[in-house]
Image (cartoon, rainbow, N blue to C red):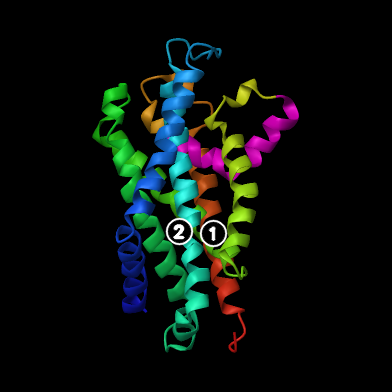
């Protein structure tokens, strides 16, 4: 099982880094969002308790979440490609547990996404958001947990999709609201009551908290969600998505 997981994960690495357009495109989108929105909303951003915090600083953790969310889930589109090419059927009949398919895809996609996130994390000292080595370790842990959860969610959705076009359509409608209602664009306490509850129930909100809090440890006013509560919610979400993905793969008919 370990060999199968390692082989599938390594294949995800090779596939991604052998496609330069994917590398450039996955990094360009969040960077452009950060520069354009950070500059555009910078002059009008005013929020209680966030005096002295620029919008570029506030939006930076949201950019990391965008990269973890979008890259993690869209990396699982390779499941559909593998099915159409016949590779997935070969893996399914191989004498390895089907859990290896889930772990290989999730670990490979998580590693690819983390490599991209580290490029943006390297920019944090220039924003005055360097959290120190302890905070950087917590930030990395938060990115790992968030990416694991969203990648496993991508496996759940991609496993039943027959075309990449359908996957993109579903994800575009599903992912963007999920990210926008995480608190990446505006603080939770600025939202109306009904929207606040929607944001609290959104797993991306807690994923954002465990990314933002280590970066903003020096500014207590940023911390709107207790770290341990956010971490617990994010871990439960990631484990739940992994469990659903494993159960779903095991339920697939042998003749598929």
**Above or below: residue 172 compared with residue 163:** above
User: Which residue is under mark 1?
Assistant: 154
Region in magenta = 192-212
How busy is the neighbourhood of tag 1: few (under 14 within 10 Å), some, or many (20 plus)? many
**Image quadrant in which the C terminus is located:** bottom right
Q: Nearer the viewer, residue 176 or 4?
A: 176
- Estimate the x, y position of residue 10 in percent, counting from the top left: 31, 68
Q: Which residue is at 46% across, 66% downward?
A: 78
Of callouts 1 and 2, the N-terminal one: 2
Q: CA distance from mark 1 to mark 2?
A: 8 Å
**Marking on residue 75:** 2
- Given this view, does label 1 or label 2 mark the residue nearer the observer? 2
SS at badge 1: helix
**Marking on residue 234:** none
**Quarter occupied by residue 108:** bottom left
Q: Nearer the viewer, residue 69 or 168?
A: 168
Please indicate whether residue 160 sits to the left or right of residue 87 in the image: right
- Estimate the x, y position of residue 14 in percent, counting from the top left: 30, 65
Is there a contact, CB below 8 Å, between mark 1 and mark 2? Answer: yes
Q: Which residue is at 31% across, 37% downward?
A: 121
């Amino acid at each position: 099982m370990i060999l199968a997981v390692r082989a599938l994960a390594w294949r995800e690495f090779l596939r991604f880094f052998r496609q330069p357009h994917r590398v450039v495109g996955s990094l360009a989108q969040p960077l452009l969002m950060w520069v354009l929105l950070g500059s555009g909303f910078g002059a009008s951003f005013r929020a209680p308790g966030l005096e002295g915090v620029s919008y570029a600083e506030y939006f930076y953790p949201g950019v990391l979440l965008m990269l973890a969310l979008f890259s993690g889930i869209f990396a699982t589109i390779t499941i559909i490609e593998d099915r159409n090419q016949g590779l997935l059927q070969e893996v399914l009949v191989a004498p390895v547990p089907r859990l290896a398919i889930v772990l290989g895809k999730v670990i490979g996609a998580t590693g690819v996404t983390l490599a991209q996130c580290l490029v943006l994390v390297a920019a944090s000292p220039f924003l005055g958001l360097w959290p120190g080595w302890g905070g950087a370790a917590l930030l990395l842990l938060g990115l790992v947990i968030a990416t694991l959860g969203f990648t496993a969610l991508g496996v759940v959705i991609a496993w039943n999709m027959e075309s990449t076009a359908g996957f993109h359509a579903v994800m575009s409608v599903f992912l963007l609201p999920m990210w926008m209602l995480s608190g990446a664009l505006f603080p939770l306490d600025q939202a109306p009551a009904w929207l606040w509850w929607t944001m609290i129930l959104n797993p991306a909100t807690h994923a954002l908290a465990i990314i933002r809090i280590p970066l903003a440890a020096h500014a207590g006013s940023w911390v709107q969600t207790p770290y341990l509560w956010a971490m617990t919610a994010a871990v439960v979400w990631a484990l739940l998505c992994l469990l659903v993905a494993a159960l779903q793969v095991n339920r697939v008919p042998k003749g598929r």
